[in-house]
Every structure is written in structure tokens, then in C-alpha cells.
Image: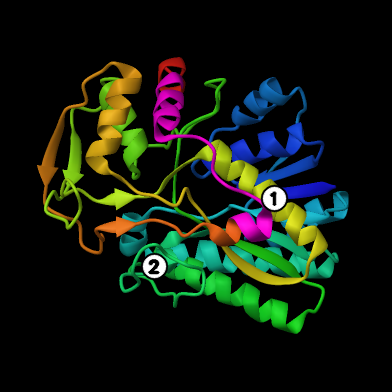
Amino acid sequence: MKILVTGGIGYIGSHTCVELLKNGYEVVIVDNLYNAKEDVVDKIETITGRRPVFYKVDIKDRDALEKVFEQHSIDAVIHFAGYKAVGESVEKPLEYYNNNIYGTLVLMEKMKKFGCMQIVFSSSATVYGLNNSVPYTEDMPTSATNPYGWTKVMIEQIMRDFGAAEADFSAVLLRYFNPIGAHKSGLLGDDPNGIPNNLMPYISRVAAGKLPVLSIFGNDYDTADGTGVRDYIHVVDLAQGHLRALEYASKHTGVDEVNIGTGHGTSVLELVSAFERASGVKVPYTIVPRRAGDIASCYADTKKAAELLGWSAKLSVDEMCADTWNFTQKAK
């Protein structure tokens, strides 16, 4: 099978491309390099011994994307391409709606034109909003607290509506929880441009001396140690979940939402402690006020992933931290 991976140079996309190539798939990547580096293609080849086809293409560019579909007989799409910073989405809502939603519409238009009717979509646990209780199950109502989250809610609805209109359409909407970790080789990991928006790359940069101190947003939540609890999942486990979703989509029609997490939560302070154990480095931190919209706890019910996809997370938080530190050390 030939798989089009949008945003395949990014953090989760690159790890997924590695798993696809290791499992015999042909991979075509389109990425506009907005928050990624082209040398990741070389690293994917080093790890797998196989080089994916790469096009520097923005999925909003109708003509360029059409040429990719013309040149390759695409069997299925894994769709990662999208802006993903919550805070930035509040500051730049029009850019987020244009990029994430319009880009997806162009992609699906080309999929329909070329008869490619299978997609695995990179959704998010943010679609559960503020009013559901943990653990989150896929049948809960969705909502959002920021433009980034709303783009995920809206794209999910677009795909459900398309599936209702097209009987042969198949989509698996993977609701990620909190991906962290890195590839065992140390060649691939979460290395965002600028100041990180996510916790783990911030911790690792503080540990490496690239940033002075970690800010922890609130220690007065109703949790065991007062800090926020999240469901952290190793990026390699997450990547393998995409392969199971792809296999499922190839054999079924319709649209399914599936949580991809470990099913249990880890607090910010517990994650910091785990990272200190893995690295042997003390991570200085300071407690600052809560961020608006943050919730105390967020973790998945993972039964549907096990039943529908035959998938479950295997790697521990300690392994996530050790692999992150290995990547941080090699990236110096």
C-alpha cells in the first residue's frame, strides 16, 4: 500500500513514517516545513534503510497537492498537517481555522477526486472540553475551549458528514492524549522551533541548560500533589496505533473515533521526578498561576482502542523520559 502522510516531517508524523516503512508500506510525505526540518527525511532513511518520497507542499495549495495525487496512486492518507499550539491559536484564530480546516477540505477534495477513501486523522483529547469527567470515553459530547480545539471538533464533524454522504469512505479519528518520548536511536524526537509549547520538550531543555527554569502552572488542583494530571503516551506507541488504525480502515467503512492513550494519568511533578531519574539531572522549577482553560485531570478510557484496533500502549513513563533525554543529548 502507498500511504500519503501529511505533516510527515513533524514529531508524530516522522515516527509514524518510520513504523510504516518498517512494516513494508510505501510512504509519500507532504510537509510545508512550517515547524519541521527537512533533514528528518535523512534520519528516517538512516533508521529504516528506506527513503520516503518527500514533497515540500502545503496542503492548502490545490494545484501542488493535485500533482502529488497524479504522480502517485495513493491508497490511504494519514493526516497530521496542522497548527497545534493552543496559546497561539487564541492569538491567531483566523490562521488556525484557515490552515487546519481549509487545508483538510482541500485534502479531502483531492482524495475524493482520485478515489482515495481511507484516512487516519490526527485528532486530540482537547475535543472533550471542560465538562466531561475522566476517564474520557469516545461517546462523550465534544466541545473546545480554544480555536485549536475547535478545529479538531470541526474536522471530526466534517469527516462524519462526508462519511454519511459517501458509503465507501473510511476514517479513524485518533484522539491523542499527551505524546512524549523519542525514537530509541536518538535521531528523532520533539524539537520544536522557538520556545516549546509542550511540557516534555520544555523539561528537557531546562535539564540541558538551554532554558533556565520550568514553570509549573498551578499546584492547587484537586490531584494527589496539586499539579495537573495528564495521560502521557510514548510517541512510538502512538505511531504504532496509526498502523493499527490504517489496517482497520482498510477493512471497514464508516467513521470511528478512538482514544489513543495509556489509560492512566501522571502529574506534572511526577513527570519531573521521572525525568530527573532518567537523566540524573535536577530540573529547577517554579510554581506560577494556573493557565485559563486548564483542567485538573485528563486521561483516556482505552477499551475501544483495544477492542477495535487490537492496540494498547506498551512503554512506561520512565522509558518516555529516558528516550527524551537520549534524544536531547544527541541533539546537542
* 173 left or right of 74 in image: left
Residue 144 sits in quarter:
bottom left
Q: Front-most of 256 and 147?
A: 256
Residue 95 locus on image (x, y percent) = 44, 63
- At 39% from the left edge and 56% from the top edge, which residue is drawn? 299
Q: Amino acid at mark 2?
A: Pro
Q: Is residue 301 visible?
A: yes
Q: Earlier in the sequence, mark 1 or mark 2?
A: 2
Q: Magenta residues?
A: 306-326
Q: Does dot 2 land on a helix, a strand or a loop?
A: helix
* 290 left or right of 325 in image: left
Q: Amino acid at mark 1?
A: Arg
- At 40% from the left edge and 75% from the top edge, which residue is drawn? 143
Residue for badge 2: 147
- At 65% from the left edge and 49% from the top edge, which residue is drawn? 242
Q: Main secondary structure of the magenta part?
A: helix
Q: Does the magenta segment cover residue 315? A: yes
Q: Does dot 1 land on a helix, a strand or a loop?
A: helix
Q: Front-most of 68 and 305?
A: 305
Mark sitting on residue 244: 1
* 274 left or right of 304 in image: left
